[in-house]
Image: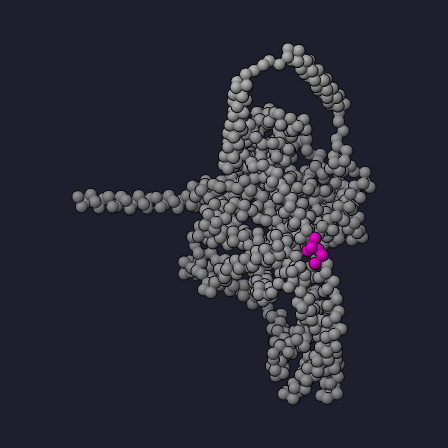
Amino acid sequence: MSHSFYGQMWAEAQDALVDLLQEEFPEVQPRAQKDRLHIFQTLATFYLKYLQIMHSLEAVYDQIVHPQKRRVVRHVLEGVMGRLLELKSEMVELEHSDFHYFDDMLQDLKMTPSDVEVPIPRYFVREQMHVLKDREKLLGHVLAQGGHIDQEKESVLGGRRMPLEEAVQLLQVSERARQGRLRARLMKEIRDQEGRSFGPRALDPDVAATRIQKVWLGYSQRKRTINQRLEELMFLGMVPRPQEAARRSRLHAQHVEDARRTVQDQHEAEYQQALVAIKESVRSVDGPDFRQTLQEQIRQWFLECRHATGKFPDFPSAEDGGSAAIFAQKTPEQVATELAAKEEEKGKKRQMKGKKDKKSAKEQKDKKKDKKGKSKGKKGRMEGGEEEEKGWKMTPSSFLPAVVEGTKMYKEVWQGRDESQNVLQRFDAQLVREEKRLEVEEEIRVQVDEIMRQELKNLKLVVDREKGRKKTKGKKGNKKKKKAKKSGKKKKKKERDLTADRSIESLYEELVLGGFLIRPKNIRLSEYIGEYSYLGTTLRQADIEPMPSLSDVRQLITLYGILPLGSQSVHERAPLIKSLLLAGPGGVGKKMLVHALCTETGANLFNLSPASLAGKYPGKVGLQYLLHMVFKVARQLQPSVVWIGDAEKTFYKKVPKHEKEMEPKRLKKDLAKVLKSIKAEDRVLLVGTTRRPFEAELKSFCKVYKKIILIPRPDYASRLILWKELLLRFGAKLSPALDLSSLAKVTDGYTQGHILRAIRSVLTTRRIDQQIKKPLTALEFIPPLAQQDPIYKEEEETLKVWYSKTPLGKKRARITKAGEEEEQAKDKRGRGLKKGTDDKKKKKA
């Protein structure tokens, strides 16, 4: 697609964003809302609209080649991402559920379920590709030195070693097949010779023509019928369309996108070179003139102030802006009065501090009592007089200022700009020059300020005969003492660095060789296949809590894990999520999601599962040393994911006898302490996976894992898509003989892992080659499925009951109970009114 196409897409996204910002900042502040349904619809509308804008901006940023435009788009995109996370957090607090359904709203906004999918910005990995490649080389080098076998590379290069029995069986099958082919060829030759010996039999031409017509008409009609039936099934979506044309167009589109990214890199390199060259040019050409002009202006200000006030002014400090504060459209008298007012304020603050220190302990206690009384009084007022004014209002956002700033920049610079001459979309040198001129002026201003401060001091000594040196020295000494006192008060205990004498490289190597830092599998989140839930809203309206779909799980992984880990600015200001728990039966793809999380963000993967900790770094000191190493390397090489498999073992209610030697509860006490040390600037996420969370102590378990995602087994729609995608991926040709709908129905209770194993066992290389003569049927997949145990309803119900006991599950249960009670009260009122009207009618009669 062309540059103008992406320019138009950017313009449309910005227009939609302007309309949305007007709704975010209305002229008249709305009243506090009380209706929960209305509040959710407000939040959901904002969420969906921001999601649409994010889709457009992400595509624009990935494909636009102008380096200066890309910076503006990136600024707005990160603001929109952060706002999306804030709205999600508000919806969770409102509904006390991580899963939300927008079925009814999609129709109003003319959106499809694919539009609800949260896009993953491609620049998360692309812009740190060289770092990831270097890390991959280092990891491979360390593993090679330690003698570890890389299983993935071994399987790609040499394949697995075949057992002797299997090799003999394979040879026998091949030899029998060869002999059978020879025997069939021999028998064919014998039949041909026998046919020739009898000779051709004469046939009447009319009869022969009739037979040929009959055969041809039957064949052509059968073919036409089959084609019509296939077209109808394709139209209904029951049979996938041929993939060749779609594959060709996808490859061409991919080629075009890659070409645009190459141009992006070239333009970015040119832009970076121009930044340095233009800055040097501005400094050498405009710098001396600006320096001289600024010095003359400051000297003139000195004289004007002395003429107005009778003495030379004090020069503003660097904290107050230096000479920039002088020329901020103010007269010398205004600047002098401002400086005098600041000095008076400082004096007052010192006096107030002295008074506070002199106050006795009794007065402080009295104040505390008064405060308690006031707070109680306020609560009473809120409960009594202001009860009606209570309600929900949108909380202030920390990302909207960035969005507003980016929108303003777009309007002022890019909206009406004529780009007809810039066909190749290279950087704009004039904009660079203006930007660098401001930087150079600021640098020169700082240098000139230092010179003029000294010059002002000399003028005061000569003209006003002030002895400023002693005073300033005395003041400085006092300030230093005060600063020392203040710093002494504010000092906090710093964590002791247990590995201060070691480099990050040595710690990295030790963790790799110990098996605590592992290579994540190259899995994209899009490979986690699942369909959208179309009945979520309907079920909730009927007071039935729906099981989340796999599409909902995929969106939560993006919102809670990928977006914060991928962007530093989003992670610092968005609602902080330090830990995540993926709970669900075996085979639903919990480990796959962990690997996808690392692949999409380029994160390191640390494995602190009880199995990997067994027998390593014994004792309390050893465990603390290991955790210190892990989290130190994780912070230095962020983003990082710390994975704990079988997370319930760390919080066992009762440790099984056969696991006592492993000491699975070693991490229990230290894990909560380590989580507290993670700050907003640390892109580190703790992810636990568990199949049996009900075996853990609930209170301590939920204290560590604040966000819990319950992953269900796939529903019918997800299973149908799963069968289609996996069969095509493994090289199967889908035909009407293969009834996918029946397979999806039969596999109710089976997980993605079960289906994958069944497909692998059936689709061998030999079976794939035989598809032309012998199409695949659904019956072939039944035996391998029958050999596996499905997920029974009892296990799923146990997980549901456990989740209902978690903090969020309890809150959700309270809301549903309150809703049911309200409905019952309404029904009673309705019945009472009906009875009253009936009684009145009887009396009249």
Q: Residue furthest front?
A: 205
- Left or right of 304? Residue 283 is right
User: Residue lying farthest right?
Assistant: 145
Quadrant into which the C terminus falls: top left
Q: Residue at (67%, 45%) from the top-left corner?
A: 599
Image: 710 above or below 676: above
Residue 241 lies, in percent from the top left, at 56, 37
342 to 747, vertically: above or below: below
Residue 169: image x %, image y %?
A: 73, 20
**Residue at the top extreme of this rendering:** 198
Q: Would residue 216 be seen by someone viewing this image from the given angle?
A: yes
Please identify the dominant SS of the magenta region. Answer: helix
Left of 589 or right of it: where is 396?
A: left
Q: Considering depth in this image, is 423 or 67 the residue closer to the camera?
A: 423
- In the picture, residue 517 is in which quadrant? top right
The quadrant holding residue 275 is: bottom right
Q: Residue at x 62, y 63 (%)?
A: 420
Q: How many marks?
A: 0
For the point 78% across and 43% down, which residue is it? 140
**Range of the magenta residues?**
262-267
Is residue 248 shown above or below 220?
below
